Image (spheres, grey):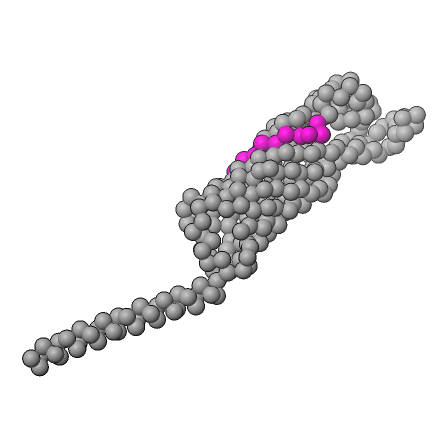
Amino acid sequence: MYNLLRLKNRQLNRWAAGLLLLIASQQVNAQLRDELNLPDHDSKTYYLGIGLIYNSARFQVSQHPSFLSNDSVMVVEPENTGGFGLAGMHTLRLSPRFELRAIFPQLLFAYKNLTYHIKYPDPNKNEAPVMTKRVESILIGLPLHLKFRSDRIGNFRVYMFGGGKIEYDLASNSTARKAEDLVKLKKFDYGVEAGVGFNIYFPVFILSPEIKISNGLGNIHSRDANLKYSSSIDKLNSRMVVFSLIFEG
């Protein structure tokens, strides 16, 4: 009987110790959760966000073979010009490391200037030896990215991404007729993108500063051999550096 009581006491002690360990572990987990902002966010399969965008854009210029025989335009130089935009973020969690992100709608106001050095400027057309043509684009885009995420360290995480994009230019002037002083652009473009960002977890949202390089692969120049500012150019490819502040929840 005595041995039986001792055995039961030992079992009760073990159960009590196990119960205490369970309670202690739950308290530790609760404390860790209290220290982390949005501790359950990584378990979401899908979440939304909004991005505020600043871009620095320019053209990559390829001269036409007839440029050397042109007796008016001597030099064509692209310039970096700033713009802004707004985007919606749709993110699908594939695994703890990988996410698929679609950016739609993305609206970008981009300005890409071209500076021309004119050999014989025409004062009747208000031409000067150096002329800058401001080329404006209003871009509706759909970038698609695959993101690779690091481990979360407290309320901070690093990620990298890459993917592609398609864009439609609402300000395209490729069909303009009276365009003697214009550089015409096509409506559609496509390209590749890559960048890096940081997730900073706050109590009610995630702030993600992000920078990416966005390069167009298509020739967006609608060349017209009869136009002074267009005939000397063969191809125009879009080049853009984009900085975003993304708010997600």
Does 47 lie within the magenta span?
A: no
Q: Position of residue 145 (x, y in %)?
A: 52, 40
185, above or below 82, in the image: above
Taking the image as drawn, is residue 77 in sight? no
Quarter of the N terminus within the rendering: bottom left
Question: Farthest bottom residue?
Answer: 2
Q: Nearer the viewer, residue 185 or 102?
A: 102
- Taking the image as shown, residue 84 lies to the left or right of residue 7, namely right
Residue occupying the point 47% across, 45% down: 46
What secondary structure characterizes most of the magenta part? strand
What span is in magenta? 163-172
Q: Position of residue 247 (x, y in %)?
A: 58, 50
Q: Nearer the viewer, residue 241 or 52?
A: 52
Within the image, what quadrant is residue 225 found in?
A: top right
Q: Position of residue 192 (x, y in %)?
A: 56, 36
Residue occupying the point 54% across, 60% down: 203
150, above or below 194, in the image: below
Count of picture labels:
0
Residue occupying the point 70% across, 38% down: 109
Q: Nearer the viewer, residue 146 or 10?
A: 10
Question: Farthest left residue?
Answer: 1
Q: Nearer the viewer, residue 172 or 217?
A: 172
Residue occupying the point 23% across, 71% down: 15
